[in-house]
Image (cartoon, grey):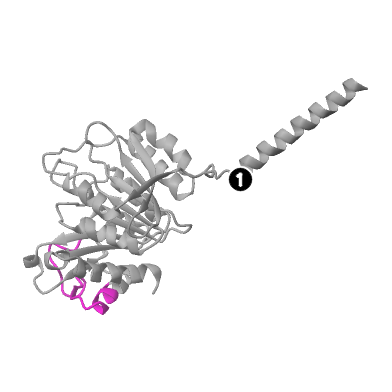
Amino acid sequence: MTHSRTTIKAATGIVAALVVVALVLLLVPTTKKSELPDDGQADLSADVQRFALGMSTESGYTQPTPAQRAAIGDGVRRVLDGRPREAEDVLAPVGYTIRRLADTATQRAFYEISDRAAVTRGWGRILVDIDPKVHLGIEIPHPKADLDSESLGTGLFRKVPGSVLVVAGAHRRSGEQADMAHTTDSVFQTVHELLIQRKLPVVQLHGYQNESAPDSDVVVSAGPELHSAYVDRIAQRLESAGLSVCRPWVTGCPGLEGTTNVQARFAVARGGDFVHVEVSRDIRDTPESRDRVVSALARQAVGQ
C-alpha cells in the first residue's frame, strides 16, 4: 500500500511538472515558424543611399548564372508567399541573405534580401514590405548614375505599404552588362519578371539632366508602346501635383522614352502595368520636390 501511494505521488508530481512546463511554453513569446526574428531597426533611406554611393564605374559587375538568378528569384517568391524561413535556405547557397528589419521613419517591418559575398558582384538588393497584400513594384535600375533616383524609390516604398523595392547593385557603367535597364540576364530582370507575373503594377524610376527636356519636370512612358491607360493615369496624378509632364505619345521626348528598356518590353508583352518615369535634375535636387513626385505616384498606387 505504501509503495502504491509513493507511486501515485510520484506520478502526480510528474504531471504537475509537465503542466507547469506547458504553461511556461505558452506564455513565452515565440516567433512563428514561417517568420524570421527581428534584426533591429534601420533608416531605410540612409541605408539605400549608402549602398548607392558605394558604387562606382570601377566596381565591376559579375554576370550571374541562370542557376544563381533562379535561386534568388525563388527566394524572393517564397518571401512574397509568406515563407521567409524557406527563402533563407534557398538564398544561402548563392551568397544571399535575408533579414527582417523595421524602418526608423515608418516603424513598418520589411525583409531585406541582399548579397553577402566577399567580392562585389553588383547583383542588387530587394526590399519587401511585410504587408499581407503586395501593392506595387518599385525599380531603381541606375542608382548613383541617376543621382537621387534611389531617394525617390525609398520615398515611394515608405508611402505604399506592401511594396517591393528592387535596387540595382552596380553603377550602370561599371561593366558591359551592368546597365540593368538593358540586360535580361540579371537578378534585377528575374525579380522584375516575378512581379509582372504576379500582376503587380511596376514603377521604374530614372533621372535626366534638365537640358534633355527643359520644359518638363517629368517624362512618363510605357516603353516601346509609349502609351497605356496606366501611364495616362500616372501622368494625370503628376500633373495634379503641379508638375509639368511630357507625354511622348503626344509631343515626343527624345532619349527619355524608354523604348529600348527590357523591363518595359517584358511587361508590355504580358499585358502588365509598367511606367518608365524620368525625373529632372531640378526636381530630384530637394526632398520637397522629390516628395511631390513620390506622393503623386503613391496616391495612384493606393487608389486615393
Quadrant in which the N terminus appears = top right
**Vertical comparison of 82 with 300: above or below:** above
Q: From this viewpoint, which residue is outermost toward the front?
A: 2
Residue tagged 1: 27
- Depth check: give the residue in front, 130 or 18: 18
Q: Residue at x 14, y 73 (%)?
A: 216
Residue 266 image offset from top left, x and y in percent: 31, 54
Name the amino acid type tagged 1. Leu
Quadrant in which the C terminus appears = bottom left
Residue 272 image offset from top left, x and y in percent: 37, 60
Q: Residue at x 38, y 55 (%)?
A: 196
Q: Residue at x 45, y 57 (%)?
A: 131
Task: Tell me the magenta residue range.
Answer: 235-259
Q: Is residue 238 magenta?
A: yes
Q: Quarter of the image holding residue 302? A: bottom left
Is most of the magenta stretch helix, strand or loop? loop
